[in-house]
Image (tube, rainbow, N blue to C red):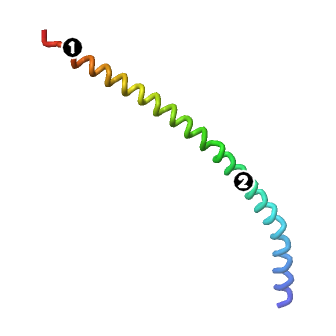
Amino acid sequence: MYNNLYINALQNLLFCVPKAAVLQGKSVGFASQNSRFRNAKPKLLFSLQIIFTKLKRFLSSILEFLGILVFLDFSK
């Protein structure tokens, strides 16, 4: 009975040190990952704004072209 208690106590002591180091490393890793995501959000919004602006220009030029085609008479 006492042997099991000693073994459990030693196992807990031996496990707690690496566990604390691993958890500290995970915390630092998640913190850096979160900061990268925070930095990427404004860039994403900016790039989406550029994409939709270009798409709007493209669609307006297509509509303008189609409007010109309507006035042309191809039946002659």
Q: Quadrant of residue 14?
A: bottom right
Say the numbered circle drawn on residue 72: 1
Mark 1 or mark 2, whichever is nearer to me: 1
Mark number displayed over residue 29:
none
Residue 70: quarter of image? top left
Asked whether the residues under the numbered discs 1 and 2 touch, taking CB atoms below 8 Å apart as contact, a structural biologist would say no
Foreground residue, 19 or 35?
Answer: 35
Q: Above or below — where is 45 with respect to 69?
A: below
> Residue 32 appears at what percent x and percent y?
72, 49
Pointer 2 local density, CA inside 10 Å: few below 14, some 14–19, many at least 20: few
Residue 71: x %, y % from top left? 21, 16
Residue at the disc numbered 2? 31
Identified at 81% across, 80% down, the residue is 8
* The C terminus sits in image quarter: top left
What type is the residue that disc 1 sits on? Leu
Is 17 above or below relative to 2? above
